[in-house]
């Protein structure tokens, strides 16, 4: 008797849904608490707390519905054989437009086109509700319906331009990779990631947002002075017009080697009236660079990618695996999809482990900024970001440990305060 791979995958998907729903219920109960955590009493205003609580509960209710619909659709697609049926139908479409359905690359692109249309249809109602109901209700949404659909169309166009050559290359590599397939696939994805990290900020991001140099002034001088003191090779300092879409705020950095750039959301500058708070947030980000967190994360991703491809090469010729999911052929893309489903248990464990490491990095970056003398400013900046983004004030410890890549504000402030007490 053959092992029921498909049934096992669907069963585990449902188990994980039940487990994560349990965590969501714990978090929902925490969000309903009527009082601030003791650490935040006197730090966060009652007005901001009430707004944050209402926003978080709205998002929580929406999340329950979205996750239920998602698990229902995903399970049905696998259990009722919709995936192999759709694969066959996408092949029969090709002769209608004069193309060869025996060509696996064309067949795969036809399949992906159908998947993209399906995903847009199923995701669109949720995206619209999230943006124009929840985000708008709480004062965050700033984009018009026209801008929303313009971004959507741009995203689809980018997928149409970039997707086919990438997918075609992967299929060719798998078909001709031989015993070194894992190495070839990893090398291709490694080069692709470098290329995308290079062209994204220069060619892709400007399609969606406007990036302008940070004007001359005190803030620019302070950031440049900080970067210079750490020998951070800052080449450009931008402000992005995040306010055209949302009033959420952030800051980030990117770039290779000696060509680093820092980007501030215009909403961050508007919300943090004190320049020191913004510089403290940048000091935290530069801490990640100085402590090599970015490099460690990149290396970890590369190792995991290689191990995944190594696992894929072990199962890609398993006819039993394909047959269990309803396929009588072994297409490359379908093999990758099936493999991703079969390693879901490992993916959850790895994700949990990476979150633990990321949270540790955040504490280290906070400590780095504090060591530079930005302790009080960082504390004020973190509180300001928490308030303005209406982030959850009360969090369940199990939920945050499993889901959060950043520690909750309560834990970060406690760590900063503990460092102060040690110094005293």
Image: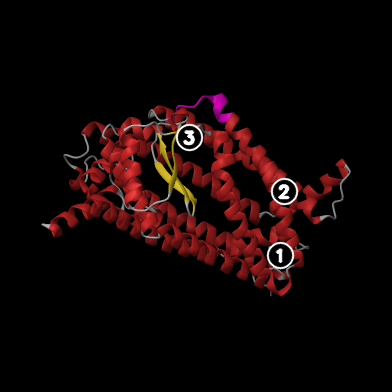
Most distant residue in the left direction? 424
Q: Position of residue 163 (x, y in %)?
A: 68, 47
Q: Is residue 135 visible?
A: yes
Real-space Cα distance between discs 1 and 3?
Answer: 37 Å
Asked whether 145 falls inside the magenta stretch, the response is yes
Identify whether 339 is placed above or below 105. below
Between disc 1 and disc 3, the foreground one is 3
Does the magenta portion include 358? no
Residue bearing the label numbered 1: 322
Closer to us: 386 or 376:
376
Q: Nearer the viewer, mark 1 or mark 2?
A: 2
* Quadrant holding the C terminus: bottom left
Choose top left, top right, bottom left or bottom right for residue 318: bottom right
- Identify which residue is drawn at 59% across, 60% down: 190
| Residue located 37% across and 49% down the image | 25
| Residue behind mark 3 | 130
Point out residue 148 in the picture as x, y percentages from the top left corner.
55, 30
The disc, 1 or 3, on the residue closer to the chain's N-terminal end is 3
State which region is magenta: 141-149
In terms of sequence position, does the residue under pointer 2 or pointer 3 come before the other?
A: 3
Give the vertical position of 2 relative to 211 (above or below).
below
**Residues tagged 1 and 3 counted as in contact (Cβ below 8 A):** no
Q: Give the residue number, with chain letter if any, for mark 2.
A: 164
Q: Residues within 10 Å of mark 1 (few under 14, many from 20)?
A: many
Q: In the picture shown, does residue 205 fall above or below 172?
A: above
Q: Quadrant of the N terminus?
A: bottom right
The secondary element bearing badge 2 is classed as helix
């Amino acid at each position: 008797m053959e092992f029921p791979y498909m049934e096992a995958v669907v069963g585990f998907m449902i188990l994980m849904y039940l487990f994560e729903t349990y965590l969501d219920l714990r978090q929902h109960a925490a969000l309903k608490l009527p009082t601030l955590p003791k650490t935040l009493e006197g730090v966060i205003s009652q007005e901001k707390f009430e707004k944050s609580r209402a926003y978080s509960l709205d998002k929580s209710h929406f999340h329950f519905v979205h996750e239920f619909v998602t698990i229902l659709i995903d399970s049905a697609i696998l259990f009722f054989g919709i995936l192999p049926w759709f694969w066959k139908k996408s092949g029969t479409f090709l002769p209608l437009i004069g193309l060869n359905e025996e060509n696996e690359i064309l067949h795969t692109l036809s399949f992906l086109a159908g998947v993209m249309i399906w995903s847009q249809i199923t995701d669109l109602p949720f995206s619209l509700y999230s943006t124009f109901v929840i985000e708008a209700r709480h004062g965050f949404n700033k984009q018009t319906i026209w801008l929303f659909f313009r971004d959507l169309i741009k995203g689809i166009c980018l997928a149409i331009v970039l997707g086919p050559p990438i997918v075609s290359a992967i299929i060719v590599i798998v078909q001709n990779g031989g015993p070194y397939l894992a190495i070839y696939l990893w090398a291709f994805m490694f080069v692709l990631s470098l290329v995308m990290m290079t062209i994204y900020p220069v060619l892709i991001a400007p399609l969606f947002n406007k990036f302008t140099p940070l004007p001359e002034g005190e803030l620019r001088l302070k950031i440049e002075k900080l970067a210079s003191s750490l020998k951070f090779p800052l080449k450009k300092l931008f402000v992005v017009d995040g306010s055209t879409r949302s009033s959420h705020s952030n800051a980030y950095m990117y770039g290779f080697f000696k060509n680093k750039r820092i980007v501030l959301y215009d909403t961050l500058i508007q919300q943090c009236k004190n320049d020191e708070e913004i510089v403290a947030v940048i000091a935290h980000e530069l801490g990640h660079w100085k402590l090599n967190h970015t490099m460690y994360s990149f290396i970890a991703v590369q190792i995991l990618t290689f191990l995944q491809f190594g696992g894929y090469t072990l199962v890609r010729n398993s006819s039993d695996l394909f047959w269990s999911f309803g396929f009588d052929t072994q297409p490359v893309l379908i093999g990758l999809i099936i493999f991703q489903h079969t390693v879901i248990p490992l993916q959850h464990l790895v994700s949990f482990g990476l979150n633990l490491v990321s949270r540790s990095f955040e504490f280290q970056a906070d400590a780095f900024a504090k060591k530079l003398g930005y302790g009080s400013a960082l504390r004020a900046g973190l509180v300001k970001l928490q308030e303005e983004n209406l982030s959850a004030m009360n969090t369940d410890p199990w939920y945050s440990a499993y889901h959060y890549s950043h520690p909750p504000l309560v834990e970060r402030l406690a760590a900063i305060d503990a460092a102060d007490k040690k110094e005293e």
